[in-house]
Amino acid sequence: MYAIIQDGGRQYKVEVGQVLDVDYRLSTEKSEDGAAFAPKEIRFDRVLAIRDGSTFLLGRPTIESAYVVAEVQETLLGPKIYIQKFRRRKNYRRRKGHRQLYLRVRIKEINPGTALPGKREEAAIAQPESAPAESSGQPEQAEALAV
C-alpha cells in the first residue's frame, strides 16, 4: 500500500515504514515556558491518491477522509547554500550562507478513511455533471442601444 501526499508544495510517494525529510514546522502545543517546539507526530491530510493492491483511489484534488500519520524522528539541517552578490567595477561583493531546517519523519499509518473500495464512487469515481444543452447553435445577438 502506498499513498501520494502533498506537503510544502511538493508531492511525495510514501509507504508505511518509509523515512523522508519534510520542511520544518512548529507544534501547535507550547511548553511550560511558552516556547514552541517540533511536534512528535505529523498528520498529512492532503492525500492525492492511494494504491492498495489492485485498488487505486484518486482524489479530485484530494481524498476527503484519507490521511497519513508520521512520527518525527529528528530535526536536521540541510546542505549549506551560498548566496553571492557581485557588481563589477564597484568593489561590491557579498556572500551569505543558508541552511534549511528539516524534520526527518517515519510513516506510521496510511488511513484511507471512508474511501474504501465499496465507496469508491464517492471518493474518486464520481462523474462530473454534464453541461446544460444549448437551445440552438446560433450565438445570441446583443440588443442595440439607442443613442
Image: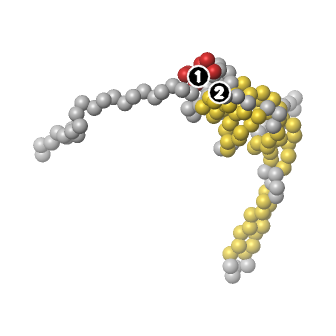
Q: Which mark is residue 120?
A: 1
- Identify which residue is drawn at 76% across, 34% down: 15
Q: Of the two numbered discs 1 and 2 on the same chain, state the one appearing first in sequence.
A: 2
Q: Residue 113 in the image: x percent, y percent? A: 67, 21
Q: From this viewpoint, which residue is outermost toward the top? A: 118
Q: CA separation, marks 1 and 2? A: 9 Å
The foreground one among 33 and 41 is 41
Tag 1's secondary structure? Answer: helix
The foreground one among 136 and 45 is 136
Badge 2, how many Cα within 10 Å: few under 14, some, many 20+?
few
The foreground one among 44 and 27 is 44
Q: From this viewpoint, which residue is outermost toward the front? A: 54
Q: From this viewpoint, which residue is outermost toward the left? A: 146
- Identify which residue is drawn at 74% across, 67% down: 84
Q: From this viewpoint, which residue is outermost toward the bottom? A: 89
Badge 1, how many Cα within 10 Å: few under 14, some, many 20+?
some
Q: Which mark is residue 31?
A: none
Identify residue for label 2. Answer: 55
The foreground one among 132 and 42 is 132
Q: Residue 91 in the image: x percent, y percent? A: 73, 78
Q: Looking at the picture, which amino acid does disc 2 mark?
A: Thr
- Identify which residue is drawn at 65% across, 20% down: 116
Q: Is residue 78 visible?
A: yes
| Contact flag, marks 1 and 2 (Cβ < 8 Å) | yes
Where residue 90 sits, quadrant-wise, is: bottom right
Q: Quadrant of the C terminus?
A: top left
Q: Looking at the picture, which amino acid does disc 1 mark?
A: Arg
Q: Quadrant of the N terminus?
A: top right
